[in-house]
Amino acid sequence: MGLFDFFSSDIAIDLGTANTLIIHKDKIVVDEPSIIAIDKTNNRVLAVGREAMNMHEKTHENIKTIRPLKD
């Protein structure tokens, strides 16, 4: 038994700067923009993915969007 024999190829995660992909058994199950929207007054996450992308630069001044792998 090799060191990495316990790993499975059933799931793959691609944390890209533009998009996050999750692939399970050769099927894409998540394909979302890599972005989050945060309320600056309490640091609460308001939205992720497409919903956060829709808020990007179109929201109240207390809400900011961040691309965690880019910013």
Image (cartoon, rainbow, N blue to C red):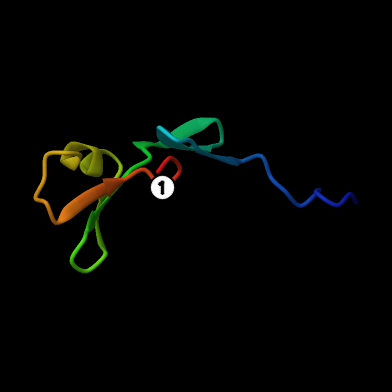
Q: Residue at 76%, 52% (x, y): give it.
A: 6
Which residue ends up furthest to the left in the rendered image? 60
Image point (89%, 49%), residue name: 2
Q: Measured from the top left, where is residue 63 in percent x and y?
A: 17, 53
Q: Residue at x 69, y 45 (%)?
A: 8
- Residue position marked by numbered label 1 in the rendering: 68
Q: How many marks?
A: 1
Q: Quadrant of residue 20?
A: top left
Amino acid carrying mark 1 in the image: Pro
Q: Position of residue 54 (x, y in %)?
A: 18, 37
Please say if 26 is above or below 45: above
Residue found at the far bottom of this picture: 42
Q: Please, is residue 53 above or below residue 2 in the view?
A: above
User: In the image, is residue 44 above or below residue 7?
Assistant: below
Quarter occupied by the C terminus: top left
**Image quadrant of residue 41?**
bottom left
Crowd around label 1: few <14 · some 14–19 · many ≥20 (10 Å): few
Q: Nearer the viewer, residue 61 or 51?
A: 61
Helix, strand or loop at disc 1?
A: loop
Residue 33, horizontal then vertical, whole percent: 34, 36
Image location of residue 69, percent across then percent down: 45, 43
Q: Nearer the viewer, residue 19 or 42?
A: 42
12 left or right of 19?
right
In the image, residue 31 sits, relative to residue 45, either above or below, namely above
Q: Is residue 36 left or right of residue 4?
A: left
The structure residue drawn at horizontal position 9% and vertical position 50%, both measured from the top left corner, is 60
